[in-house]
Image: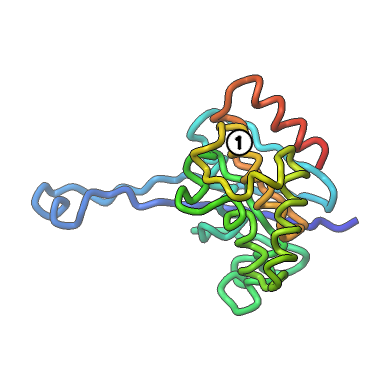
Amino acid sequence: MGALVQAHDLAKTFDVSPPWLNRVLEGKPRLMLNAVDGVSFEIEKGKTLALVGESGCGKSTVARLLVGLYEPTRGGLTFDGQDAHAAFKTPQGRKLRRRIQMIFQDPYASLNPRWIVEDIVGEPLREHGLITDEAELKDRVGELLKSVGLSPLDMVKYPHQFSGGQRQRISIARALATEPEFLVCDEPTSALDVSVQAQVLNIMKDL
């Protein structure tokens, strides 16, 4: 079986220099931070790859490179035989993003506090034109919430009405909405209590 995802020599450098005027007045050089340098791996369809490393080693940067939130400074990413980062820049990029979704590390920052759960989980379905009928959309959101251990009645609530573990379940439901082929998880339990971590990991295992 061929690899679904192929990362080759991925690198990402960030410019962390002081503002231009400060550099001129103080005579300071530009400062570049190599967050990721030379990362290569392959992931087959149906398989799981875990990146392990200390805090600040670039795991989250790799995750964001995989879903197109960052553009690599060097190297390339192939998804299902196509150049992913080139495709992200084209009109066809929407179709690719539908196939790749991400669960973010911080459930407190990744959910819009002004939206109810129905809008949060239903947004990918609306954005990609998968469901246009409102009644059908409600039904689908309810199904997604049940799949992560929440109640369809929760769809009228706001994020602040949930615990950290429940918020992360909402994030998982949102990521699953488009039925992606590739799911990137950026330390989805690191911001949660140990008991809640186990609950979220069990949900991930069931998926």
Q: Nearer the viewer, residue 109 or 94?
A: 109
Q: How is the image coloured?
A: rainbow
Q: Nearer the viewer, residue 53 or 88?
A: 88
How many numbered marks does the figure carry? 1
Left or right of 202, for residue 21? left
Q: Position of residue 190 (x, y in %)?
A: 57, 30
Q: Position of residue 74 (x, y in %)?
A: 53, 58
Give neighbour class at mark 1: few <14, some 14-19, many 20+ (Cα, 10 Å): some
Residue drawn 85% across and 49% down?
46
The residue sitting at the bottom extreme is 91
Quadrant for residue 195, please give it: top right
Residue drawn 77% across and 67% down?
81
* Quadrant where the N terminus is found in the figure: bottom right
The residue sitting at the top extreme is 194
Quadrant for residue 170, please give it: top right
Q: Position of residue 67 (x, y in %)?
A: 61, 57
Label 1 SS: loop
* Quadrant where the C terminus is found in the figure: top right
Q: Nearer the viewer, residue 179 or 2?
A: 179
The residue pinned by badge 1 equals: 187
Residue drawn 51% across and 57% down?
70
Q: Position of residue 98 (x, y in %)?
A: 69, 64
Left or right of 17, for residue 47? right
Left or right of 133, for residue 159? left
Residue drawn 8% across and 52% down?
25
Amino acid type, callout 1: Glu
Quadrant for residue 48, please give it: top right
The residue sitting at the right extreme is 1
